[in-house]
Each structure stands twice: as C-alpha cells, then as structure tokens.
Amino acid sequence: MPLQQPTVSGSIVTELDGTVNLEVSGVPANTTAVRLNYIVLPTPGQSLVNQTRDIPISNFSGGAYSLPPSLQSLGKTSLGINIVPNYVQSVDVSGNTSAATRLNYQTITPYFDGRAQLKQNLIFLLRAATVDAPFNYVEINTNTGNWNIVSNPDNYSYASFYIISGNYYYYGNNMEPFQDNYLYRNFVFNSTNLDSNGRITTGVGGYYYGNEAQLASGFWQDFPGGLMLLTPPAFQFQSPPTNGTVIPALLATNNSRWLVSYALDTLRLGYRRRILFSQNWHDEQHGRWNVFDV
C-alpha cells in the first residue's frame, strides 16, 4: 500500500526550563497518531537499531507534546550510542504511514534584559571592596563540605556574562548577570534577614583567623578564614521559564545601603570598620557585633 505524502515535519525542542517538547506541523486531517522512528545504522560490533513508538494525536495540544524521558531515549547500543528519535511520520485511521522526515533538534536560547543587573553588580563590587583589598570571600558548600575562595582582580572591577578563569581564558554564561545579582544580595543588609540575636541569616559570616561551619550531615568542619558564604544561600537565582520575562534587579541603591565586606565575627573588625565608615559600629550597650551596627 502506498505511503502518504511526506507532509509531516517535526522538531524536538528543549525549553528554557529543561522540558522537552515534540512539535509537529503539516499533519493530515485523518491522522490518528504520530510515529517516532529510532534508527541507528549498523557498524562493526553493533547491529541495526530500527524501532518505532506511536503517540496518539489526541495527546498533542497546539501541535506540541511534552516528550517523557522514556521517549527521549530508548537506551544505548552495545557501543554506547544513545538511541534517540530521528524521524517522524503520521499514521492514519487505516494504519497507513506517511514517508518519514528527519526530526530537527532545537534548544531555546535564553534572552533576558540584564542591563540593570550588570550596572548594579559593578557598583556592588566597587563598594564592597575594602580599603586594601578587592571583594573576596570563602564559599562553603554545606551539603558536600567542598569550599572555594572567590576572588576578584585587585586593580579593577568588572561585571559581565563572561567569567575569567585564571589568567588565560574565559567562558560565557548567559545567566551570569542575574546569578551574580542574586548572589551579591546575600551580602546586603536587610532587617528581614536577621535573627533574634542580630545575626544575618543569608549565609554570610566568617572569622579572619579560621572558619568553622556545620554541614548538612550535622558534623562541624574547619575552613579557611575570612568573609564566608554558606551555600546554598538565602538568595539564589532561578531562571524564568519564558523568554523576555522581566527579572527584578535586587541591588538598587536604596535597597543596598549597607554591605558586608569583612568577616563578621572577627574582633578586630571594630578597628577596621571605623577606618572604613568613620563611625562607631559596636553598640556597647547591647553588646551586638555585626557590620551593620545593629
């Protein structure tokens, strides 16, 4: 029996939120199912793979179907090749199929306006630098116990979606301006982020001569001294599922008047903060110690 005309075209699209959709067009009116073909050609040590899976046309909405993991891949061949759909057909009420057309694979590129975030991030780095050092801190993962010293250049500041790694290369991350904006928010004072003792609850703290932190396992572990950030912190960026969404910038001038630049639990902090801000940051009457004088 002759095949239908190859009118169906299809794409497998990975959306911003990681979901995978099968999108089809040109589907004949008498179609009852869309057939995916999984073909891997034979090679030495590996036999031909030729399998199909049918998806009822009623499962599609507006020409799109959320493809479950079980249909994104049927596993791997004996040589480790991933068995993924590569052709699409339509199936009519009589079981006739159209000629197969090759599937396109697409990944949606995120686009969001990050100009406000880039400007705020640069201002933050300039302000958060101390009188003798750039903004640096120890990042501690409380789930794994791993740590990393996050440092910035000592003779300039920059904000970008490029990340400098060492002295020789860099790589791009489209979400970097937004991730940094949320990350830096953890180093900003807000009375809603203090506990009953006046300590900041965003994950920021630290002691210059050595840090100690409790891990998720309940054990305590020693880490290098200095300003620290326990991760996961209170403020973390989550990418919106829809392109063009307006992402709020968190470091507006009126909302980021006070910043943490020094390790909060160091006794000599009182001396350093007077040099930086020319005011008494230690409330002797209440005995509170933090960078915000509260």
Image: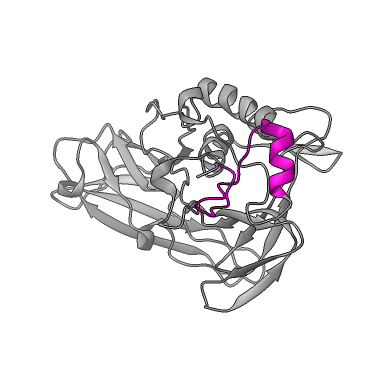
Left or right, 260 with reference to 57: right
Which residue is drawn at the image coordinates 29% and 42% (left, top)? 98
The answer to which of 227 and 117 lies nearer the viewer is: 227
Q: Where is residue 66 in the image (x, y as percent from the top left)?
A: 29, 49
Q: Which residue is drawn at 77% across and 61% down?
A: 209
Q: In which quarter of the image is residue 147?
A: bottom right
Residue 169 visible at all: yes
Q: Please give left or right for residue 92 compared with residue 223 in the image.
A: left
Q: Do we see residue 14 in this rendering?
A: no
Q: Is residue 221 above or below residue 51?
A: below
Magenta segment, prevailing SS (helix, strand or loop): loop
Q: Where is residue 79 in the image (x, y as percent from the top left)?
A: 62, 69
Tell me which colouring the rendered structure shows: one colour
- Front residue of 76/129: it is 129
Which one is nearer the viewer's eye here, 112 or 61? 112
- Residue 131 pos. (x, y %): 78, 33
- Read off the magenta span: 269-292
**What residue sits 19% from the left and 40% below the top?**
61
| Residue extending farthest front | 285
Lateral position of residue 58 relative to residue 216, left or right: left
Residue farthest right in this picture: 167
Residue at 58 percent across and 79 percent down: it is: 219
Tally of numbered discs: 0
Query: Does the segment drawn in magenta span residue 246?
Result: no
Query: On screen, 268 above or below 15?
Result: below
**Residue 12 at x, y percent in the picture:** 40, 43
Q: Nearer the viewer, residue 250 or 173?
A: 250
Whether residue 277 appears in magenta in the rendering, the answer is yes
